Amino acid sequence: MSNISLFANAGLPAVQSLATSLRSLSMDVGSGGVAILKMDKTGHWVFGADQTEVQDGAIWAVNPFSFTHGYIAWGKGEVLGEKMVRIDQPLPELPAAPAGADKGWETQIGMSLKCLNGEDEGMEARYSVTSVGGKKAAQAIAVAIAAQVEIDQTNPVPKVALGSEHYQHKTFGRIYTPIFKVVGWMGMGGEAEAQPAAAPAAIEAPAAAPAAPARRRRAVVA
């Protein structure tokens, strides 16, 4: 990595305040120039309008200052309304749900990531999710960051591998849920700094759940 800052943090709260804000995500669980990252229904991670698959072996850095929470309203596959704020701010007040919203307002969690290697190195992506499994995965990485900064504020950025697990639903069949597996920590400048204390243990993927079957990565269409 270069000496250029990994993430811009102008106007954001100090690293010391991250722990309290990130831990609050557990209470919620029950993009110009930035790609949209998501896990599809087959358990594969994809990004962009062309649904390009994330390259095997890619490692991503999660911006610890990028977590947001709020609400979104969908209608027939289209976003009808969205109200999101930084995680250190109270949830926004809501008007009546937009006309035609399938489920009214749904709670949503979001965060930003940057690819660190491979074909997509340097690409920034935004991950936002309303599903219970997706929110639990975002909550888990947020709590891991909170634990990390309480021990070592110099390396608050988790390096993660994107994975998945699944369970069998009686009605909908196999349901895949995301996993962010922590493989290391680094500073906001992009390099791991000397750690005064041991970092928390990495979040390991559950052993019982097999990964989604491999398939060829589609090329981005210009």
Image (tube, rainbow, N blue to C red):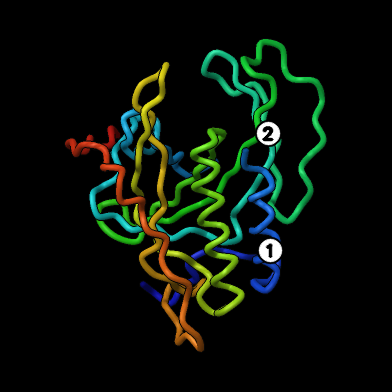
In this rendering, the answer to whether 180 lies above or below 1 is: above
Say if residue 70 shows up in the picture: yes
Task: Give the label on residue 200, or none.
Answer: none
Q: According to the image, label 1 marks what residue?
A: 12
Q: Nearer the viewer, residue 167 or 67?
A: 167
Q: How many marks?
A: 2
Q: Residue at x 42, y 76 (%)?
A: 191
Image location (x, y in percent) of residue 205: 36, 53
Q: Is residue 122 visible?
A: no
Could you tell me the amino acid type at mark 2? Tyr
Q: In front: 27, or 187?
A: 27
Is disc 1 surrounded by few (<14), some (14 to 19) or many (20+) residues within 10 Å? few
At 41% from the left and 19% from the top, the residue drawn is 170
CA separation in Å, label 1 and label 2: 22 Å
Q: Is residue 153 above or below residue 34?
A: below
Circle 1/circle 2 CB separation < 8 Å: no
Looking at the picture, how far across and down is residue 34, in whole percent? Answer: 48, 45
Task: Identify the residue shown where x is 34% and y is 32%.
Answer: 51
Residue 54, located in which quarter of the rendered image? top left
Hey, what amino acid is under mark 1?
Answer: Leu
- The answer to whether residue 60 is above or below residue 187 is above
**Residue hosting label 2:** 71
Neighbor class of circle 2 (other Cα within 10 Å; few <14, some 14-19, many 20+) is many
Which quadrant: the N terminus? Answer: bottom left
Rendered residue at 35%/41% (across/down): 165
- In-image side of 178 versus 8 (left or right): left
Left of 93 or right of it: where is 24? Answer: left
Vertical order, 202 against 36 (above or below) = below
Q: Secondary structure at mark 1?
A: loop
Q: Quadrant of residue 215?
A: top left
- Residue 172 at what x, y percent from top left? 40, 19
Give the mark nearer the N terminus: 1 vs 2: 1
